[in-house]
Image (spheres, grey):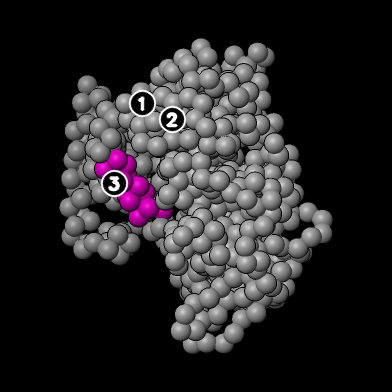
Amino acid sequence: MNEDRLRTQLGEAPVPGAEEAERRGRRLAEAAFEQRQPRDRRPALPRLALSLAAATLLAALLLTPAGAKVRGWVDEALTVGVDDAEPALTEIPGGGRLLVGTPHGSWMVQPDGSRRLLGSYPEATWSPRGLFVGASSGHTLSAVEPDGTVRWSLSADAPVADARWSPSGIRIAYRAGRALRVVAGDGTGDALLDRAVQPVAPAWLPLGPHLLAYVDGEGMLRVVNSDSGESVGSSPASRETAALDWAPDGSRLLEATPRALRVRDVAVGKLAAQLRLGPAHRVALPIGATVRSAAYSPDGRSLAVLLQRPARNRRPAHSELYLMDRDGATQRLFFTAPGLLSSLDWSPDGRRLLIAWPDADQWLFIPVEGRGRVRAIGGISQEFAPGQTGGGAFPLIDGWCCER
Amino acid sequence: MGSDSAERKLVREAQRGSREALTDLYAAHWRRAHRAAYLVVHDGAAAEDIAQDAFLAAIDALDRFDRRRPFGPWLHRIVVNRAIDWSRREALRRTVDDAGSQADASPPPDAVGEDLMAALGQLPVDQRAVVVLRYLLDYRPGEIGRMLELPRGTVNSRLRRALDRLGDLLGEVER
C-alpha cells in the first residue's frame, strides 16, 4: 500500500454529515465553555444551606427562590435533608394524586394525603384522566380502578413492563419480554407491534392519532401508528437510550441516556401519515454528570433535568436539578443537594416539581414559578411500610395525576 | 493549525475565559478530530459523539492543562482511545445481541475513498487506530506508542500488518 496515497485518501474520504456535526459540536462546546467557571473567578453561589465542619465537608446549596433550608453534615452518621421537613404526608401540595411504587405494591395517595394499597403491583401508570391505573405484575397487565377493583387483566407470555396509556385513553402499549404490544383500553384486541425492542418505555405522541415512539432491537428509534402498524418515521436512536419523552405539543422528542440528553425536532405531516424526525441535538450538560431523570413540563415550555454529579474538587457527590427551555439551550441550575435525588415528577398544573431524596428519606415539593416555599415531607419510607419498624425501601413515584 | 506558540496562547486565553480563543481552538482541531474518530469507528453518529466528548473533556480539564504541552496530541489521544473503546464495545454488543445486522454506519455519500473505507473497515480496530494516527494525524510510531500505551515495536508491527492487508484488499477491489 502506497503511504502517500493512503495519506491523501484518509484526508479526503468523505465524512457523512461533517458540516452539520461541526456546527452542532461548536454549539455544544461553546455552551459547555459558558457553563465552565474558571476556578479563580468562580462566583459565590447563594448559599442557603448550612454546612457544619467535619473532616469532610458537605455543602448543601439550595438555589430555589423559595429558600428552604437544606442541611448536610458529616458526623458519625450522615444526615442530610431539609431541616424543617414535615413529619408526615398530610396533603399533596398543589393537589392531584400520586402513584407510588414500593416492594410491597403500588399505592395511591389522595390530595389529603390518605393512601390506599392498590395491590402487589411492582409497576403502575395512570390513565390520562386518572380514572384507571395500568398495573403490571409478572406476566399480567391489569386495569385497576382507584379503589383497587380490577376492571380487567390479561396474561402475556413474558414479563410485562413499561405499560403506557395513550393520551386518548383507548390504547395501552406495554413490553412483554422483548416484544412491544398494544391493547385497547378495555382489555380487548391485544396485538403484537414489534417482536424485538430495547428495554425502553414506549412514548405516545401526546396529540392526534395513536403514534407510538420506541427503540427497536436494532437500535432504531421508530414511530408507528399503533392502529395500522405502519411505520411513520424512523432514525437511529441515541446509543444507550434509557427514556423517551415527547414535548406536549409533539414538536420535540427527548432521548435520555445515562450520560447525555438529545432533543429532536419533529414535524408531523398532514393526517399524520408521515412524521419527520430531525437530527438529535445534544444538550450541553456538566462533564461527568449522570442523567437521573428528565421530563417536559405540562405546558411544554420547560424541561426539568435531574443530574447526579460525582465527588470532585473537594465537593462531595451531589445532585442538581436544572430547568431548561424545551431545547435545552438555556439552562438554570435550580436546586442542588447532597447525595442522590432519585426521581422527578411535574405536578399536573406544572407549578411544582416533586423530587425524591432517598438519602434524607424525604420528598420535596418545589415550586418552579412565583412565590412559595419548598415543602419537604420526611419519614417517607415509613409512610409506605406500615407496621414495619425502621421503614422499608424508599418508595418510587410512578406518576402525579390530575384531580378526580 | 497555527504554530505551537500561537496555540499555547489560545489555550492560555481560553483558560482565562476567552470564548474567542475557545472558538479558534475548536476551529483548528474539530475537523481532524471528527475525521479521525469516523475513520476508526465507521459510524457517523458515534464519531460525532466521540469528538464532542473529547472537546467537552478538554474544556472541563482546561484549568489543569499544562500549557507547555501541545493541545492537539492531547485531544487526539482522547479521541482515538475513545474510538477504540467504542468499537470494542460495539463488537461485543453485536456478539451478545447476535443481531446479524449491518452497522448503522452511514456509507460515504459518493465514491471518493469508498474502497479505502471498505478496506479500513476490514481491519481490526487496533490496526485502524494506528493507521489513522500515523497517516491522517502524522504521528511517529514512538508518539503513537505513548498515546496508546504500547511498545513502539507493537505500533510498527501493527502498521506493517495494516498496510499489507490494505494493499491486499484494495488490490482485490481494483482488479
Can residue A124 be found in the magenta stretch? no
Q: Quadrant of residue A61?
A: bottom right
Image point (23%, 49%), residue name: B159
Q: CA distance from mark 3 to mark 1?
A: 36 Å
Q: How many marks?
A: 3
Label ID, residue A156: 1
Residues under numbered marks 1 and 2 in contact, where contact means CB atoms less than 8 Å apart: yes
Quarter holding the C terminus of chain A? Answer: top right
Instruction: Decide which of A259, B73 is in the foreground and name it.
Output: A259
Q: Amino acid at mark 2?
A: Leu
Q: Residue at x 66, y 21 (%)?
A: A208
In the drawing, what numbered circle is on residue B155?
none
Question: In which quadrant will I find the N terminus of chain A?
Answer: top left
Disc 3 or disc 2, which is closer to the eye? 2
The amino acid sitting under disc 3 is Arg
Label placed on residue A141: 2
The residue at the point 68 percent across, 39 percent down is A402
| Image x and y of residue A365, in percent | 67, 57
Q: Are marks 1 and 2 on the same chain?
A: yes
Q: Chain of mark 1?
A: A
What residue span does the magenta drawing correspond to?
Answer: B79-93
Mark 3: give few (<14), some (14-19) or many (20+) Cα within 10 Å: some
- Element type where label 1 sits in the image: loop
| Residue at point 58%, 49% (across, down) | A115
Q: Chain of mark 2?
A: A
Residue B79 as seen in the image, left or right of residue B153: right
Depth check: give the residue in front, B66 or A190.
A190
The answer, for residue A50, to whether it is visible in the render is yes
SS for dot 2? strand
Question: Do the residues marked 3 and 1 share a common chain?
Answer: no
Neighbours of disc 1 within 10 Å: few (<14), some (14-19), many (20+): some
